[in-house]
Image (cartoon, rainbow, N blue to C red):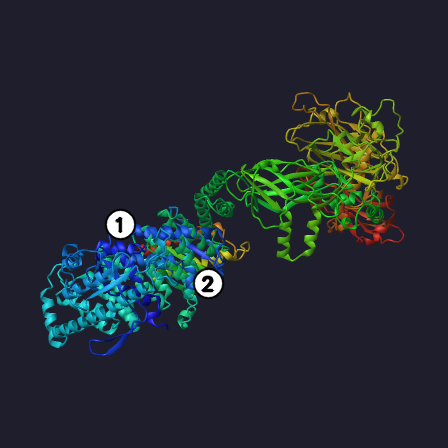
Amino acid sequence: MVEPENTRLGKMLLDEITPVVMVLRTPLVEESCRKNGLSFIEMLSPFCNFNNIDVPVRTASDHPYRLRKFKLRLFYASEIRQMNSEVAKDRLKQVVTHAGDRDISELCSDPPAIETIVATSELEIVPSWFQTFNKQLVDAVSFSEHESFDHPVACLVAVSSKDQEHIDKLVDLFDTNQLPSLLNDGAMDPKILKYFLLVHDNQDDILEKSTGILTEMRSTFGAHDCRMLCINSSVDGSEEHHENPWASYRNNALHKKQFGCFINVDDIEELKTTMQDLSSKHIIPHMELKIRVLNQQVSATRKGFRNQIKNLWWRKGKEDVPDNPNGTMYTFSSIESQIRVLGDYAFMLQDYELALSNYKLISTDYKLDKAWKRYAGVQEMMGLAYFMLDQSRKDAEYCMENAFSTYLKIGSGGVRNAVRCGLWWAEMLKARDQYKDAADVFFRISVEEPLHSAVMVEQASYCYLLSTPIMLRKYGFHLVLSGDLYKKCDQIKHAIRTYRGALVVFKGTAWGHIRDHVHFHIGKWSAFLGMYDEAIKHMLEVLACGHQSRAFQELFLKDFLRIIQETGKTFEVLRLQLPVINFALTKVVFEDHRTYASSAAASVRESLWRSLEEDMVPSLSVIKSNWLEIQSKVLPKKYKESNVCVAGEAIRVDVGFRNPLQIPISISNVSLVCEHSTESDETVSNASSSLINYQNDTELRTVSVSGDFSLDTPFFTLSEVGTSIQGGTSILVQLTVTPKTEGTLKVVGVRWKLSGSVVGIHNFNADVTRKKVARGNRKLKQSIKNKLEFLVIQSIPRLEGVIKNLPRTVYAGDLRRLTLELKNPSTVSVKNLKMRVSHPRFINIADQEAMDLEFPNCLKKHANSSESYNHVDCAKAPNSVFVFPETTSISADTPLVWPLWFRAAAGGSVSLCITIYYEMEDKTAVITYRTLRMYYNLEVLPSLEMSFKISPCPSRLQEFLVRMDVINKTSSESFRIHQLSCVGDQWELTLLHTVDSVFPLEYLIAGQALSCFFKLKKCQTRVTTEDNLSSLVTSARADVRLGDSDSRLFDTSISPLILFHHHERLLQEKLQQEHQSTIDFILMSESQNESESGQPRSSEILSHHTCHCRIASTSPIRWLMDGPRTLRHDFSTAFCEINLRITVYNSSEDHLSVRINTVDSTPTVIPVSSAASVSGNEEGWHDLSHLSDIKLTSDLMRSKVGKALSFESVSSFVWSGSSSTRFKIEPLSSAEVPLQVCVFSPGTFDLSNYSLHWNVLASGEGGDDEAGSRVTSSGTCQGHSYHITVLQKD
Amino acid sequence: MIVCLAVVGHQNNPLYIQSFTEADDALKLHHIVHCSLDVVDERVNNPKKSGPTLNETFLGLLYPTENYKVYGYLTNTKVKFILVTTDLDVRDTDVRNFYRRFHAAYVDAVSNPFHVPGKKITSKSFAERVSTIVKSFGLSSSS
């Protein structure tokens, strides 16, 4: 624990609570002193401070001690009065302003980190001017009448030797009229110790004369009380002082003349002795004496039991005295005042125990008298005395608090006293390391006056910082509070200073609201003071404030732009926060050997293109070796890994900008920042004018002219984009750079201009390094770095291709002819063109001749065309590469035009990728081949949907009933059904009804459904299955005209229909299991709508393909019972025997074993127990609701029949012959089995009580490799009803 | 009346801060909540804590500002709940009761699998639930 005297408060008290000496002087005295640039008091003051005066003093109880530290306070008589509050206020303001001006330089430097602040000591953190300020506050309340330590103890009367009539002058000086009111109104004893001083100016007067005057004075006023002081002994005024005692006055002196220049060493010595003499020989003994006298007096009247009772009694009687806060009722002669004087004198002579006991004595009296101000003053002194004695902290604090609150209680008169009391109290707490409590006290001091409280709150904040545990948040909060108060009093520099201090606390925390507020205000105020760099730096921090409300965002942005405008300069800001760059979105598109026809093509995944180009481009290993070989010759090794791009071809970089605000912002002049270095000089020189060295850490640069960034340099050309981003949205900006010459091009970053005033620059590399730090992934860095570095090679040809008249939206089944147009703008020719399409189902490459044909008539059957078909090369395998003929050449003027067939095969969004490969004629080029990638996306709308159901004809084995359901799925389009064709020459298709009955309307309008029935006949037996695939032939019989009769039928056996059919077949084959006895249908229709422009569109042809339709049956066998239907028989002779024949057809591809069981009783077995393979037969069905309804009814009917049978089961006939016959059937063949039935009576009989049991034979003899994997299945079929009528023969 | 309610993460980052006044005093309330964290820290790190109060989540009145009273609550996961109220005579039981309900709401909100721990709570249903709790606090204390 530090000694109380050595604490700050201790020092302060030893400084402040010291005897006051009133100085009276003649004007001539002052004049002499002025020669030295000092006033009389200023000249004397340095010598009033005694650090080791070493004067023996006796306490009231005769206990001797020595006084070490002692000080006299000198004041002119005119100064001994309470300071006017206005003057005091002005002085305070001056102090603050002065301090603010002084540390403006610090405002620009970065505030230290929080850790360093915590580590530094109090002296460094707390601004030093606080002490000055606090002293001013304390001084403002000095010379109040209730505190006798401010009452002059002695009076120093000085006359100059130049004065006339010295004695009279001396007497006049002590004229009561001019004396302070304290002496006159009775607050203090007017009989004051006087000390007379004759100031002798050595320059103007001779010493002898002065000595004479002194003698005269001595005889008048007493020998001890007079003294002569010689000054200005130095003649030339060039006296130099080693340690100038007046150095501290330098601040408020204007002239340069050195202080005390006429005072030589002897004079100083004399000054010293004079003051020492005054204090030790006069003032201290005087005070000591007075203490003794007063102590005796007090003891006599107040000490002892009797006196206390008497006093209490006396006080009681005065209880009804009204409140008198001013306490004028106490004159110096009253016992209360005397006790107080006794206490104060004892305090000043550092006899704190005596002081304390007297204060205690008087405090109750004052309290009883309700003299609150005096009471508070005494309490205050008690607290200080406790502190100086270093005992009972609690009491000390209690006293201070009591004093403080009492001062506040008495209203405006006590406020300033309260402030002083609070300051002492806070200092007391600080001295005891109770910083938190001190902060509270400081906070409590802050009343009314904003400037005053600003300083107090700031002091409180430092206390929070110094407290343990450290209270950083409160520190920050109080700094912000005080900043606001400073701002209120226009002390902007102080406001900035405090806010900056607070910033340290909020930096890096998630408390965005507060941080933004602090940054914003620092920025605003800095701009106000003209510190624009600082202002912009802070404003930048708040720009990207997505969490703020819209109003705040607008305010921030507006103020920021205003500040920028005020500067009148264009700033270039690295890491401008607005808009935010989404680095993740950045995509780089460049063309080496891959070229893209459109930007959409570039966005397709590389792997997709790779797989498409797999067969076309020279195999990877080969090109790599070749390529590297050439590369290594031409290029330095270090570029081997970098990207290659071609001069004159743009590199596109997609940069994603995001607007975090809710308000739209506009950005303009968005462009890339690139550096280009030619190969010739190995060192990467600043070849480009726009290259900026970003390695140095300048975050803010001033661009003198906005136009110093040119888009068009000799090495490359940049594109520029301007746009506006709506609040909260992101946009993708496509920026390009087109290199012009060979060399290395590096994309460094992106720059943009925000609202036309601030240029933001974003460095891509910085991003990468930051990422690297975050992830520690070196590989990533490598890859991104490479991504932005390009090796520019000389210009080589680049094909441009486009597919003309490809529609964006199309109905499914639409068949069109398109043209592919390829252009070669360069003079160098290309060769070896190849092409491949990702979806051959959609696009087929036609022959060159197709260009000249008339579409769609070329698809129709020619009237004279023979039955013989033109063989289509279906071996043109799917996904094959189309090689353009050697003769095709492309030059700049004559583009290559090639026809393509297009059919919208399937609904939905379809992405078509087409890649064209070509090689350079010029063998010297670095890149020998290139590919042109085209990408189209189109939407295919559903149009007609059709389904087929084929059921066997009950009466004939080779005939089938075909039911076609067509539904128009479009919303508005109507179609005309043109024809239905079935593919394959073995089929014959006929319509069951007339055309008109099926199609009452010409068109199938939107949403309409239609079903019609056809008879399908197998007109010849199948010969072989092998050539089925290679020769798909349609005959005239396989086409059915469904529309109007005047147009010709389409020939479904020619290209492109047969080609597309082939693809459909392949596709649908994949979907369902292979069955060879299937049939494919093609429905041709025409769309008849008029286009929007009103012009009649050439009718569009649609083709719909349904492949692999199967006979809808649940079992692989079909059978037909054959026999007589009606016969006559004479039952009188014998029963009737009827021979029947059953023909069983195996429609599966497996060998079947079939057993026919005849039962005479009612069949109990309900048909069909089928395994997976059998149920698969029904898969050809589209799940349309009306179809399933029909199926349901048929099932019902069948079950009805079964039921009826069970009731009529009077066995009036029996099966004869074996009850079970077993036989095998080859696939797709039939077998005949004879049956016999015996009828006993005439009637009509239903011969359905038999069943066919089949099971699939295991593979082996069948040779079907599929059978092995298939589950062997079996099933039972209930016999069909076969009615036979037998009549009695007459 | 409750003017502000805040959830502060264990790293003293604000997770949820909602004022229930019409006035534009967000900044002030932010400051109050932020400052009260100092007091929370002080309370929590106070070595003088003894047995029964050791596991107490309710921290009581943190500090009275000029017009407000600030109450604190500390969950087991060191998440702090700060309540700022203008009521001058609030019973501790009311506040405890309130905090219990609020804690339940908070637990439900962070149990949401889409909530990222340590990030701000953006759940709308949480906000609604909190506002009903806040409203009911006003009612119970007035009765």
- In the drawing, does residue A695 fall left or right of residue A405? right
Q: Which mark is residue A400?
A: none
Is A649 positioned to the left or the right of A544 in the image? Answer: right
Q: Count the marks: how many? A: 2
Chain letter for mark 2: A
Label annotation for residue A118: 2
Confirm whether residue A1170 shows in the render.
Answer: no
> For numbered disc 1, what is the local secondary structure?
helix
Three-letter residue code for mark 1: Glu
Q: Give left or right: position of A420 versus A894.
A: left
Residue A996: tell me if it is visible: yes
Q: Is residue A358 left or right of residue A10?
A: left
Quarter the N terminus of chain A occupies: bottom left
Residue A441 quadrant: bottom left
Q: Characterize the local packing of mark 1: few (<14), some (14-19) or many (20 or more) Cα atoms within 10 angstroms.
A: few
Question: Upstream in the sequence, badge 1 or badge 2?
Answer: 1
User: Looking at the picture, how far across and down is residue A1078, in whole percent?
Assistant: 81, 40
Cα distance in 3D space between marks 1 and 2: 38 Å
| Residue type at tag 2 | Val
**Nearer mark to the viewer, of 1 and 2:** 1
Residue A88: where, in percent of width, then height?
28, 52
**Residue ID for mark 1:** A86
Q: In the image shown, does A1089 or A1186 lie closer to the viewer?
A: A1089
> For numbered disc 2, what is the local secondary structure?
helix
Residue at x-position 65% and y-position 42% = A673
